Amino acid sequence: MPMPLPTVIVLASGRGERFRAAGGSGSKLHAALADRTVLEHTLAAVRASGLPWHLEDAGHPGMGDSIAAAVRATGDAAGWLVLPADLPLVLPSTLQAVARALGGPVQAAQPHHRGERGHPVGFAAACGPRLSALAGPQGAAPVLRALREAGAVAEVEVDDIGILTDIDTPEQLARAEALLAGRLTGG
């Protein structure tokens, strides 16, 4: 019998203030990246992963509030992968690898690329009460920190710069564009 799959929660509630402050116009999630928007790229990767997913875009005041709302909306999930919507280059295989790492004594899983931690961070269903109680700008960092101290976090090494390529400035958008072009041409 296959293991139940965790739900990817795509966090799209932010206001994108850093993007506009750095000279960007409009929402960073609706900024053009090659043939689609940043958000469309992120959602395409999530769909291609085959994992269940939930888009949280209700405009919550902080990342903690967004995570809590998404977990409450998907309370029957087998766990969650927390994916900020501004990571348009994350690979479907990375989402699958983080999902597979959840299980047994492991309560969380975090991908790494060349020693740097990134997203999505996966959480087992047992973390639901702690995640649904989050509030404020900090996100799930306190939950992940406590699980790491308890030795309950799987570190997942991936060959995916997309786990680190978030879009907070027009310069980061240009970098993502270059990385995407390199992927498409095999470079």
Image: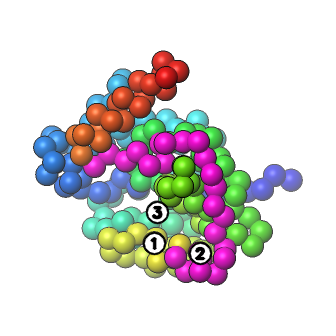
**Residue in front for this viewpoint, 115 or 169:** 115
Kindly indicate the quadrant of the structure image that contains residue 62: bottom left
Q: Which numbered disc covers residue 70?
A: 3
Q: Secondary structure at mark 1?
A: helix
- Residue labelled with disc 1: 141
- Residue 109, x across and y down, in percent: 62, 62
User: Is residue 149 located in the magenta-colored stretch of the structure?
Assistant: yes
Which mark is first along the chain, 1 or 3? 3
Q: Which residue is mark 2?
A: 148
Q: Are marks 2 and 1 in contact (CB under 8 Å)?
A: no
Distance of label 3 from label 2 (alpha carbons): 23 Å
Q: In this picture, is 105 found above or below 174? A: below
Find residue 36 and report its image quarter.
Answer: top left
Would you call the spot at circle 1 few (<14 residues within 10 Å), some (14-19), or many (20 or more)? few
For the residue pair 141 and 12, the one nearer the viewer reads as: 141
| Amino acid type, label 2 | Arg
Circle 2 sits in a helix, a strand or a loop, which is it?
Answer: helix
For badge 3, the amino acid type reads: Ala
Residue displayed at 62% across by 41% down: 93
Residue at horizontal 44%, vertical 66%?
67
Query: How busy is the neighbourhood of tag 2: few (under 14 within 10 Å), some, or many (20 plus)?
Result: some
Is residue 109 or residue 76 the one in the foreground?
A: 109
For residue 88, say whether it is visible.
yes
Q: Name the colour scheme.
A: rainbow
Please report the bounds of the magenta region as a residue range: 145-168
Q: Position of residue 56 (x, y in %)?
A: 41, 56
Taking 82 as reference, is 126 left or right?
right
